[in-house]
Image (tube, rainbow, N blue to C red):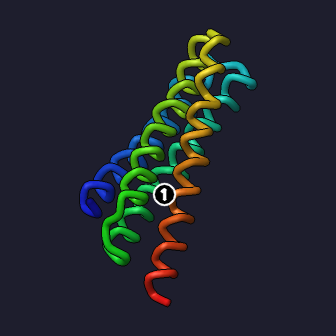
Amino acid sequence: MSRTYTAIGAILGLLAVAIGAFGAHALKDVLDEEARKVYETGVQYQMYHALALLLIAVLAHTWGESASLRWAARLFLIGILLFSGSLYVLSISGVKVLGAITPLGGVAFIAAWILVVVSALRKKRLDD
């Protein structure tokens, strides 16, 4: 699990840098200021949660694998796809209805962070 999520987190981090550079250079004359901010928000959240996947890999290696860490990783990935993905498509296409998908990604992020807390509390309880 830890190697898999290390690889996934690293790939998503790499993609965040590439997607951000693409937006800054190739799309700078295409997107208006509001669309550019939406796009940049997608990039930022993708990078934050790519790093969160790397954290999951470290925690799984340190604490041992668990269902809560596995689900946290899955939810971070789903959150990136829904949250950041919808913001990328929304900013480029201008199709506002895609904004309805973004909160689902946010919910996935929140649920994933809750599962990290659950994992930490379970680990503490086991250590006590």
Quadrant of image for the N terminus: bottom left
Residue 17 at least partly seen: no
Q: Pinpoint residue 6: horizontal percent, then vertical percent.
A: 32, 59
Outermost residue on the bottom side: it is: 128
Q: Residue at x 61, y 48 (%)?
A: 110
Q: Pinpoint residue 49: horizontal percent, then vertical percent.
A: 51, 50
Question: For numbered disc 1, what is the local secondary structure?
Answer: helix
| Vertical order, 82 against 112 (above or below) | above
| Vertical order, 16 against 1 (above or below) | above
Q: Pinpoint residue 98: horizontal percent, then vertical percent.
A: 60, 16
What's under tag 1, amino acid-wise? Ala
Residue 105 at least partly seen: yes
Q: Residue at x 51, y 57 (%)?
A: 115
Taking the image as shown, residue 91 lies to the left or right of residue 33, namely left
In the image, 27 versus 121, the foreground residue is: 121
| Vertical order, 98 against 61 (above or below) | above
In the image, 103 versus 19, the foreground residue is: 103
Which quarter of the picture shows residue 7?
bottom left
Residue receiving disc 1 = 52
In the image, 42 versus 82, the foreground residue is: 82
Taking the image as shown, residue 122 lies to the left or right of residue 11, namely right
Q: Residue at x 67, y 12 (%)?
A: 96
